[in-house]
Image: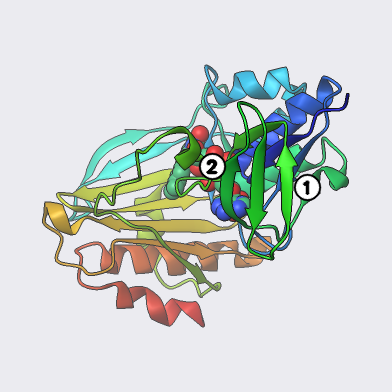
Amino acid sequence: MRQSVVIIGAGIGGLMLACVLHRHGIDATIYEAEPSAHSRVQGGLLDIHADSAQRAIEVAGLGREFFRLVRSVEDAKRVVDQDGKILLDRVGDPASSRPEVDRGALRAMLMASFPDRMIRWGRKVASVTPLNADKHRIDFIDGTCVISDLLVGADGPWSRVRPVLTDVRPVYSGTCLIEIGLAAGDARHAASIELIGAGTLMAVAPGRGIMVHRNAEGSADISRSTNPKTGSVLSISEMRARASLSSRSSLRAGRLICATSFSTAMPCRCSGQFMPCRSG
Ligand SMILES: Cc1cc2nc3c(=O)[nH]c(=O)nc-3n(C[C@H](O)[C@H](O)[C@H](O)COP(=O)(O)OP(=O)(O)OC[C@H]3O[C@@H](n4cnc5c(N)ncnc54)[C@H](O)[C@@H]3O)c2cc1C
């Protein structure tokens, strides 16, 4: 008899599992809360380690496709203190064992590896009820429900499936993430570009930090994190800024505007330093 394999969540984990199962002749159904594959920007780059995620990608038979997505030498790392003084400067390695790929591109690669029908978008799980040792009833917020023979929770930190397995709940650590999109700006702050370097820049201080990633195709991500429990003066915990650019000619401008935002905000004056760049 055909078994109903249900995966909750179309993040990297749920998609990877669906891909591997499909490759072995088992069609699972993924139920995802988001309305479509393109309903939001997926975030920045992920470094994919040889001893973990890359192994899963190999098992899925997607090694060749994966290496086409790799952003060579963007694993460069630079660490500065809160005044911009360089503490560590490591160049990118074209043969890195933990290369960087765009999260959205990785997700798209996984989704392309099995039929569209395997994902049901806009299906947010409200609750999960065990029916017996194997079967579960999954109720969605739209009032519908399905019964699974095998249920996999891949629905992130606030999983609706996890409570079936454990009483342990996520605990707020004091650090949050805020994402901000920045449009391209002009080329006024070359010194800040120099500060970022070729890959990731980390500016760290007790209780807060800013990370900037400079992408080869012309976008830059800025993340800002603070933790009030460890001494931050900010109410906003983490800021991520993204400036996406469409052409080589605007590449420089976008990097500059992000870098400028980064360097002016780095001494932890205020997140508002980023705001003018939004419409820039
Ligand atoms: C800033 C940041 C940087 C990171 N960098 C790296 C890195 O460089 N390399 C790396 O390997 N890892 C990195 N990680 C970790 C990585 O993002 C996670 O390990 C990974 O996303 C976990 O995948 P997942 O599929 O389990 O969960 P998620 O990616 O969280 O996906 C969960 C999915 O479930 C859906 N969902 C949630 N609730 C419901 C519901 N009730 N019903 C239906 N669907 C639901 C969500 O919409 C989402 O699509 C980073 C994480 C962060 C936050």
Considering only vertical position in the picture, is 277 above or below 54? below
- Residue at screen point 78% across, 34% down: 4
Q: Residues within 10 Å of mark 1 (few under 14, many from 20)?
A: many
- Residue 123: x percent and y percent? 69, 57
Residue at (68, 43) in percent of width and height: 107
Q: Is residue 43 visible?
A: no
Secondary structure of the residue carrying numbered label 2: loop
Question: Can you see residue 136?
Answer: yes
Residue furthest front as drawn: 132
Tell me how far mark 2 sits from mark 1, CA to CA: 18 Å
As drawn, 279 above or below 10: below
Q: From the viewer's perspective, is 9 left or right of 36? A: left
Q: Say which element carries label 1.
A: strand
Q: Is mark 1 within 8 Å of ligand 1?
A: no
The quarter of the displayed image where residue 70 is located: top right
Which residue matches tag 1? 119
What amino acid type is highlighted by mark number 2? Val
Name the residue at the left extreme. 231
The disc labelled 1 sits on which kind of residue? Ile
Instruction: Between label 2 and label 1, give the one nearer the viewer.
Output: 2
- Which sits in the foreground, 71 or 31? 31
Kindly identify which numbered label has been placed on residue 161: 2
- Label 2 Cα crowd, 10 Å radius (few <14 / some 14-19 / many 20+): many
- Where is the N terminus found, in terms of image quarters? top right
Do the CB atoms of the residues marked 2 and 1 lie less than 8 Å apart?
Answer: no
Of the image marks 2 and 1, the number of the one nearer the N terminus: 1
**Spot occupied by residue 178 in the image (x, y as percentages of width and height):** 40, 63
Q: Please say if 94 is above or below 193.
A: above
